[in-house]
Image (cartoon, helix red, strand yellow):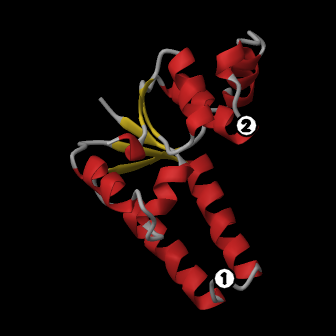
Amino acid sequence: MALYIDTSCFLKLFFLEPETSRIGELVSGEARVVVSTLTRLEAASQIHGRVASRVLSRNRGLTLLRRIDEMLEAEPYELVFCPASVIEVAEAQVRTLARPAHCRTLDRLHLATMQALGLQRLLTNDDRQATAARALGFEVNLPREH
């Protein structure tokens, strides 16, 4: 069964942070890690932000973007396009107004992408998204819990 990785974990594969090694371990044990075009866009946007704020040089940012593209061409990663229905699926999820299921819009779009693609397993580092995912019946792995 595939593992969906959201941006909060995906970026840690490129920037050394406390959960980086744990995420690498979790991913290396998977046969299929799904990365959506939403994750790729968010990652590129985060890198752009770091370049714009001069945390990274433009050359380093471009190098990171190339590394992302290379990674997405290698196993176990699989780049998938967000389904056209993702906005409608996300809206249907939030219209239940379930209290523990609230999360930010981009996180909700990740959950809608998972639902539209029929995926059940999420790797995230975001507590609110994890709570919302569990409310939808998804299996969630938070790297810092291990």
34 horizontally vs 112: left or right? left
Q: Give the image location of residue 143, x and y in percent.
A: 39, 45
Secondary structure, mark 1, is: loop
| Dot 2 or dot 1, earlier in sequence | 1
Towards the viewer: 6 or 101: 101
Q: Residue at x 74, y 19 (%)?
A: 94
The amino acid marked with disc number 2 is Arg
The amino acid marked with disc number 1 is Val
Residue designated by label 2: 104
Q: Give the image location of residue 101, x and y in percent.
A: 65, 20
Q: Residue at x 57, y 56 (%)?
A: 40
The quadrant in which the C terminus is found is top left
Residue designated by label 1: 55
Q: Give the image location of residue 9, x and y in percent.
A: 47, 52
Secondary structure, mark 2, is: loop
Instruction: Please say if 112 is above or below 20.
Output: above
12 horizontally vs 103: left or right? left
Q: Quadrant of residue 75?
A: bottom left
Q: Quadrant of residue 73?
A: bottom left
Q: Which mark is residue 141?
A: none
Q: Label 2 neighbourhood size at 10 Å, few (<14), some (14-19), many (20+)?
A: few
Instruction: Please say if 76 is above or below 17.
Output: above
Instruction: Please say if 65 is above or below 39.
Output: below
Q: Give the image location of residue 76, x and y in percent.
A: 29, 51
